[in-house]
Image (tube, rainbow, N blue to C red):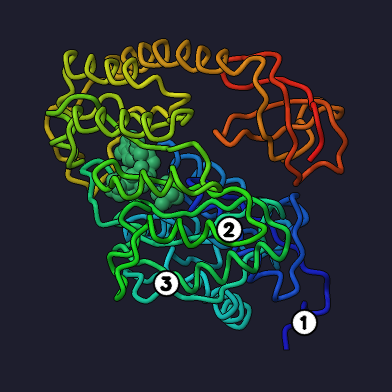
Amino acid sequence: MDNRSDKNLKYTIITWGCQMNEHDSEKISGILESLNYTPTSNREDADLIIFNTCLVRENAELKVYGNLGELKALKRKNPELIIGICGCMMQKKEIRDLVKQKYGFIDLMFGTHNLHKLPELIANNKQSSRMIIDVWEEGGEIIEGVPAKRKFGYKAFVNIMHGCNNFCTYCIVPYTRGRERSRTPEDIIKEIEELAQEECKEITLLGQNVNSYGKTLEDKTTFADLLRMINKIEGIERIRFMTSHPKDLSDELIYAMRDCSKVCEHLHLPFQAGSNNVLKVMNRKYTKEKYLELVSKLKNEIPNISLTTDIIVGFPGESEEDFEETLDVVKKVGFDSAFTFLYSVREGTPAAKMEDQVPDDVKHRRFKTLLDTLHPISHENNIKLQDTIQEILVEEVSKNNEDMLSGRTRTNKLVHFKGEKDMIGKLVNVKIDVAKTWTLEGHIIEND
Ligand code: SAH
Ligand code: SF4
Ligand code: F3S
């Protein structure tokens, strides 16, 4: 029997990366709480610290190494402390070897496919005091029934699929998350019905490419079918999803978005680059023209839709003319916001070996031009919302003003307004008074 078992054990998880990782951390929390651990936000207080890592760009990776160094002192102070590292970085053998060699004080290393094994790994570590490494190369069958301790009650992430089959040439994700696998509609619906009973109002369906949902299922349920099924679940008020690959955005899906009253008027549709040459070498499998055609279909069917995107600047071989094409897409679409990235070399991906890498100073210059083009467009879109009434799901007390609440419109815009704490988790109507580039301010005009 472990001699620490009657102590009040505390854990903390530090998460980098995308929503998929955030939700994995919620699952790790669920597992740890079922082992009687309680959360703490203070690393000094913790008996167990888990780093859930990301590998998508070099700076994500560097941040993890920076933080790992600091843990050594904590471990020296408290030799009983268990330190675990998991997530996408652990799926690469070279990184596991480096971590083993440079950070020998780590106790547990596990990957993206075997979170559910955590209780066993902790028990093994306690018994042997050796570093326990358990990483599965491939995902295989989806493990159901892992409890998740969700960060918020009123909104929740729900995985609908895992992995990615697209192999965009810059991207490491297919190597860290394995091949595409879809959960069955029955498992998904059951999870969402349970969330609805717990008064969850908004769900975000997660997958690297939700538009290709169902391809691995026997009955070939499509993502559009799934949306129509989820739309019928009582209690759920809003449905969101991420991420959509343009090549798999079907008319059927656009019609489902239009028809389902709970599906929010927002689509995150990464276009990455505007030049057809670059898109081809990226292996994105659509053209600029096809992307713009999708956007006009979306705007026709869902007139007030908000569009957001991901853009990479400085992909190998990107010329000044290619970059102009990216700016052209930005201007033609009028995005509400965009995640913008400097291309980052990821060892093991095809683009890392391409010869015509773009110099850093050129990348930075283009990056700045891109932001200067995007920002006024976002602001203009927000100004159009001034004096309109928006339905807001109240999320939290504003970070820098206790009298203010914040929440999101159906189009996923952040709004600040005055209100009482007990409104958190409720839908309210807010009249928009001020439009800034990234946020809106308003006042409640009528309660839910
Ligand atoms: N599956 C999602 C998200 C993948 S990662 C999708 O396909 O949209 C999120 C974003 O990171 C990508 O959309 C891309 O814009 C960016 N990204 C991925 N690899 C990158 C790299 N090597 N350098 C810079 N940005 C990258
Ligand atoms: Fe990466 Fe492309 Fe898959 Fe998205 S679709 S995860 S960018 S390989
Ligand atoms: Fe990062 Fe893995 Fe997500 S590499 S972006 S945490 S899938």
Give the mark nearer the N terminus: 3 vs 2.
Answer: 2
Amino acid type, callout 3: Thr
The answer as to whether callout 1 falls within 8 Å of ligand 3 is: no
Residue wearing tag 1 = 3
Q: Which mark is residue 184?
A: 3
Question: Pointers 1 and 2 in contact (CB under 8 A)?
Answer: no
Q: Nearer the viewer, mark 3 or mark 1?
A: 3
Q: How many marks?
A: 3
Amino acid type, callout 2: Ser
Residue wearing tag 2 = 25
Are there few (<14), some (14-19), or many (20+) residues within 10 Å of tag 3?
many
**Which quarter of the figure has residue 394?**
top right
Along the viewing direction, whichever of 396 and 221 lies nearer the viewer: 221
In the structure shown, which secondary structural element does the residue marked by tag 1 occupy?
loop
Q: Residue at x 67, y 34 (%)?
A: 391
Are there few (<14), some (14-19), or many (20+) residues within 10 Å of tag 1?
few
Q: Looking at this rendering, what residue extends furthest in the bottom direction?
A: 1
**Is residue 172 visible to the viewer in this orientation of the structure?**
no
Amino acid type, callout 1: Asn
Along the viewing direction, whichever of 121 and 412 lies nearer the viewer: 412
**Is residue 346 visible to the viewer in this orientation of the structure?**
yes
Q: Quadrant of the C terminus?
A: top right
Could you give the CA–CA distance between mark 3 and mark 2, rounded to whole angstroms? 22 Å
Q: Quadrant of the N terminus?
A: bottom right
Question: Pointers 3 and 1 in contact (CB under 8 A)?
Answer: no
Q: Residue at x 29, y 32 (%)?
A: 272
Could you give the CA–CA distance between mark 3 and mark 1, rounded to whole angstroms? 42 Å
**x and y percentages locating residue 287 in the rendered image:** 17, 32
Q: Judge left or right: residue 287 versus residue 202.
A: left
Rendered-image quarter of ligand 1: top left
Q: Residue at x 50, y 67 (%)?
A: 188
Are there few (<14), some (14-19), or many (20+) residues within 10 Å of tag 2?
many
